[in-house]
Amino acid sequence: MLKNLRLGLLLMMALTSVLPMVAQVRHVTTVNPMSKQSYMEVYEYDYVDIQPQFPGGERGLINFVNKTREYPYHAYKKGIEGRVLCSFIVGTNGKLSDVRVIRGSGDESLDREALRVISKMPKWSVGKVGDHAVPVRVVLPIAFRL
């Protein structure tokens, strides 16, 4: 009986130490089940052990966006400003995919330009859970200010 109690306590201790880690790993499946595409598990940026990173880090990302971004002519002429919230997936090979606008600026030309800038980005360093590279969703705002 004492042996069973000890075994039960060990099992309970093992489960309580594992459960918080399991709750922190969060992933999303991003594919329409009605299509013929395969499923892909995508981890959220804040829930991976090592987060994907742009070459040169945050400063490199800011410099890249500022050098690559071109203000759309008609938006510039009309004095339109805004911020485009975009998301994309950094794959296990570092390439970006599934680039989309989550929340637009209200002006379609600014939204298109934000997508263009992200699609021009070089490979990122990969995100990891443990020692395994995993696809990670990144959310990035692109600002347009005059």
Image (cartoon, helix red, strand yellow):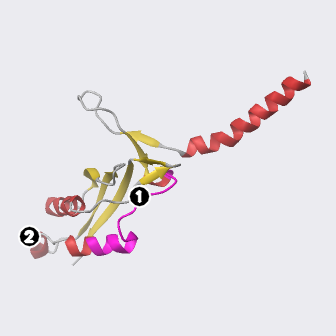
Q: In this view, does 55 lie above or below 24?
A: below
Q: Which of labels 2 and 1 is toward the front?
A: 1
140 on left or right of 1: left
Helix or strand or loop: what does disc 1 sit on? loop
Q: Which residue is drawn at 32% across and 73% down?
A: 62
Q: Earlier in the sequence, mark 2 or mark 1?
A: 1
Helix or strand or loop: what does disc 2 sit on? helix
Residue 111 position by quadrant: bottom left
Labelled disc at residue 52: 1
Find the distance from the CA under tag 2 to the CA under tag 1: 35 Å
| Start-end of magenta stretch | 47-64
Q: Is residue 112 above or below residue 98?
A: below
Q: Which residue lies furthest to the top in this view?
A: 1
- Residue neighbourhood size for the residue with mark 1, other residues' Cα within 10 Å, grouped as few (<14), some (14–19), many (≥20): many
75 on left or right of 9: left
Q: Do the residues labelled 2 and 1 touch (CB within 8 Å)?
A: no
Image mark count? 2
Q: Position of residue 139 (x, y in %)?
A: 36, 57
Q: Which residue is drawn at 28% across and 53% down?
A: 96
Q: In which quarter of the image is the N terminus?
A: top right
Q: Residue at x 37, y 55 (%)?
A: 138
Labelled disc at residue 74: 2
Q: Which residue is drawn at 91% across and 25% down?
A: 2
Q: Where is residue 11 in the image (x, y as percent from the top left)?
A: 75, 32
Q: Position of residue 52 (x, y in %)?
A: 41, 58
Q: In front: 115, or 123? A: 123
- Residue neighbourhood size for the residue with mark 2, other residues' Cα within 10 Å, grouped as few (<14), some (14–19), many (≥20): few
Q: Which amino acid type is shown beneath numbered disc 2? A: His
